Every structure is written in C-alpha cells, then in structure tokens.
Amino acid sequence: MNSGIDLQGSFIQLLVDLGLPVEVARVAWLPLPMLLVLVGATLGVLVTTWLERKISAAAQQRIGPEFAGPLGMLIPIADGLKLLVKEDIIPAKADSLLFTLGPAIVVIPVFLSFLIVPFGQNLLITDLGIGVFLWISLSSIAPIGLLMAGYASNNKYSLLGGLRAAAQSISYEIPLALSVVAIVMMSNSLSTIDIVQQQSGYGILGWNVWRQPIGFLIFWIAALAECERLPFDLPEAEEELVAGYQTEYAGIKFGLFYLGSYVNLVLSSLFVSVLYLGGWNFIIPIESLASWLSISESTPWLQVLTGSLGIIMTLLKAYLLVFLAILLRWTLPRVRIDQLLDLGWKFLLPVSLVNLLLTAALKLTFPFAFGG
Amino acid sequence: MLKFLKQVTDYTKEAVQAARYIGQGLSVTFDHMQRRPITVQYPYEKLIPSERFRGRIHFEFDKCIACEVCVRVCPINLPVVDWEFNKETKKKKLNHYSIDFGVCIFCGNCVEYCPTNCLSMTEEYDLCTYDRHELNFDNVALGRLPYKVTQDPMVQPMRELAYLPKGVLYPHGLPAGSRRAGKLPEEILEEAEENGAK
C-alpha cells in the first residue's frame, strides 16, 4: 500500500540532500510535531476560554466580551498577558519549593498526554503501544501536584481544596479507567490509532457511542470530575473554600493552574471524541466513498482532503463536547462532597463494572459486532 | 431475591429520572442561548428612571426656611444646616446647606417632611468620584439639575420593564409611539375626576 504523503520522510530527505547526516536530520524533525501540538493545545485553550465567556454570557442572556477585538476574541490574550505581567507572590510562610513545583506538576502531565492524541491516520506525535493507558497514568500525577500546592500554601482553605482535589481525582479515576478498559476490550488494543480504526468503516453507525452508551456517559461524567468542571468543582468551590488550592497563587503560577484546567478540559473532550465518537472519522466513511467514485487512495488532493477533514472532525467533536461542558456548568448546581463521593463509588463504579462485564459477554456472543 | 430485583429497578428508575431532569435543565439553558440579551449596554444605553426614582437630592436654597426638619427626620442627622438669626427681620437666615451623598442612604425622609418642598429627588444615580469627600455636596452642587437621559445625544434611553408594552420583555428596538401596558397616571386621574363629577 502506498503510504501517500509522508511529511516526515520528505523533511528528512530534504535535510539529507542538503548534506546533513541521517541521524541529525531525524533529530531535527523531532521537535516540529511536538511544537505544533504544544502551540495547538495552547491555542485550543485560548479558544476554549473565549467560548466559555461567550457561551456563559449567552446562557445568561448577556453579550459577553465584545470590545477587545472582533467579538471580544482578544480577551484570552489579554487574560494571559495580565497573568504573565502580574507579580509572582510566594506567601511568607509557604514552602516555596513545593509551592513552585505544584503548578508545574499539574500542567506538564496534561500537555504530555497530547503525545497520543490522534488527529488523523498518521497525524499524531507517537503511536504508543500503551496508548490510552499513558493518559490514565499521567492524569493520576495531577492530584499530587494539587495536593502539593494545597499543602505548601500554608492556608487551611488551600489544604482542604487540595485534599478534595486528590480525593475526587482518585475516586473518579477508577470508573474512568474501567470504561476505557471496556473500549480497549472491544478494539483489542490500547493504541489510540487502533481504537479509532476499529470504529471506522461504517461512518457514524460504527462509532463506539452506539456500542458503549453507558460507558460513554460514565466516561464523560468522570472526565468532568477529573477536570474539576462545574457540577464537580468542589476543590475550588469559591463559596466554601475561597478558591481551594489556588487561593494563595497569583500571577503566572495561577495562570498555569488556569491553563492546566482548560487544557485538561480540551484533552478530555478530545479523548471522548477519539474513544467514543470515531476520532477523525467523518459521518460517512470517506474511504469507501472514494473507492466508489473510483479515486485512488494515494491521490494527493484526496490525502490532503482527508487529512484536513480528519483534523476538523476531531476538533469539531471535541469542541461540541466543550460546549456541552459549558452548558452543563450553567445548568447543574454543584454537588456536595458526600454526594460527589457517593456518585463516584456507589453509582459510577458498580455501573462501570457492570458495563465492563456486559461488554465482555457481548464480545463473546457477538464477536463480529464487538470486536472478537 | 424479588426484593433485591425491586431495589435494582427502583434504583434504575431513579437514575433515569435524574437523567431526564438533567436533560430538561439543559434544554432550558440551551433555549436561553437564542434569546436576546436583556442587558443594557450602560455608557451607551441607559434605563429611564421611573417617576418615583430616589436619586440624588435636589435643594432649592431660596425656599429653605432653615427649620431643620430634614435633620431631625434623617436616620443619621446628615444634612448640615448653617444658619444665623437675623435680629432685624426676626427670621433665620440660611448661610450654607450640605448633604454628604457618600453617607446618605437615599431614604427620602427629608424630601417627605420638608415643609416648603425645597428638597426633591432627582433621577441622578451615577455619583462617581475618585475621592469620597467630593460626594459632600454643598448648596450650589445640590441646586444643579441632572442631565436627562432622554435628552442626552450620547445615550440611547431604554425603558424599564414596567414601562414596556404588554408582552414585550426587551427594551431594544421598540417602535416610537408604543405605549406601556395599563393606564397612565394621567388617565387614572382623569377617570377619577369624571367619576367624581357624576
């Protein structure tokens, strides 16, 4: 099979032709996709904060930002600049090492998880064999950072917020992982590419939502809890805890927490779209459409088209979920801490276990439909 | 066993019910997104204050007889009345009068009890200064009339909810001659007079 347009191959070939050794050329390629994804993720956050403001305003019958740039689109940049320029304060009795380390530990794993987010057949940084497992393990590093931040702030509200964040993350990680396991069982692989591939071929009908509706809901609820989005934003519940673990933070360190929470939201939405909504797949299978119109799969314009369509579809699905999260924010009241843990341990955990068993049973009975 | 099954079905029913309520709530918020913003874009648009609006107090120096009723009815004795007794005319002569609007609660008691009606409420509400002592208005400042919202060329006046036609919720883009729901005060007065004449 023709691999079609190979950006990496042609870039390396170009450098080799210019007289560089092959190894150096390979190393020169490495930072490019990483940088692209890093910039993409940051841009995604800017768009998300803008959407949050605009959609929140619309849901409350307001206008929202409108003077900073067209439709107030420069507001996120103004936000970021403000946080960058502000004084970076470390409280006198805080543990300055842990205080500084906290936000970094929260943010870095979230960005690292973008390693395995596919935007197309070959459009990802690395197709790891452990795939989604990497994300699950990375996302359990974040509570350590939150706990660190809460403990180091030397403030009772921060400590409580940090403890809550840790408890919440740990208890919602289990249903999250279990619903991912059900998906993995169906696609026989942890790799995100294989998971999307297993959903392709039948257009919208092949997506995992139809085979895993319960898993989809559990995953979404657990992902919201992991991101500390509104029905589950107890760690920073401002009415009770000022701002939770963020209370003592100012300037760019606060900005890192802010960035981290929004990147996490985008990332979770991307993962929902990859795991349940067919990733880069279009509503109708584009490959079979191409072969039906007798266009070769390796036609350059078709490759460019499918590639860009893949990116657009992935982002579209992810941002639909972001929209849903923002809408949920203005619909649902915050749950209490005991209700939160009740929901996590007494409802989501058993239901996700049942879902897992059900998937296993269905896989044994209908191997053709459930990836035998 | 049956009891257990019943518990399971009840629990499922409850979960489904909760999900339906969440769906209902989501549809409400979603519906709000397509509604018009009800906000008034303040420096460019302003609400027309109602007739009974209790804004900054206006004071007419010449009408004042320095009786100090306003001071006595004020919850915190706020108005400062500076007068001296004129022995020739045997009358009090008012020198200065001031009210500190940084402290005033705009209850309107002074306006209510002023025997000569030299105090009145205006429509002015945006008393902003960089120094709170600038809010201490003397008799000259108190005698100034505020700029009317309806006559300000910089401002688009917006009607308040009670002054909109029946069934209209948004003040934006009203037709020029549209009148508010219900009778106007003049009409009620007119009718009462007619009925009284009969």
Image: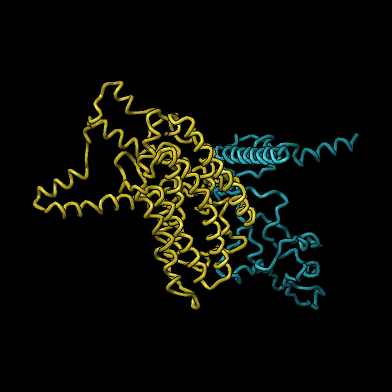
Chain colours: A yellow, B cyan
Residue at the extreme top: A293
Horizontal placement of A130 versus B158: left or right?
A: left
Res A170 visible: yes
Horizontal placement of B22 versus A13: left or right?
A: right
Q: Kindly identify the residue that appears in the image at 41 percent across and 46 percent down.
A: A70
Horizontal placement of B195 versus A128: left or right?
A: right
Closer to the camera in the image, A363 or A197: A363
Looking at the picture, does residue A212 appear above or below residue A290?
below
Residue A121: percent from left, percent from top: 31, 38
Q: Kindly identify the residue that appears in the image at 91 percent across and 34 percent down.
A: B198
Residue B84: percent from left, percent from top: 76, 77
Residue A59: percent from left, percent from top: 56, 44
Question: For the N terminus of chain B, which image quadrant?
Answer: top right
> For residue B167, what is the image quadrant?
top right
> For residue B165, what is the image quadrant?
top right
Q: Kindly identify the residue that appears in the image at 76 percent across and 42 percent down.
A: B185
Q: Kindly identify the residue that appears in the image at 52 percent across and 54 percent down.
A: A228
Q: Report the number of discs.
A: 0
Closer to the camera in the image, A146 or A144: A144
Closer to the camera in the image, A125 or B193: A125
Residue B147: percent from left, percent from top: 60, 54
Res B67 visible: no
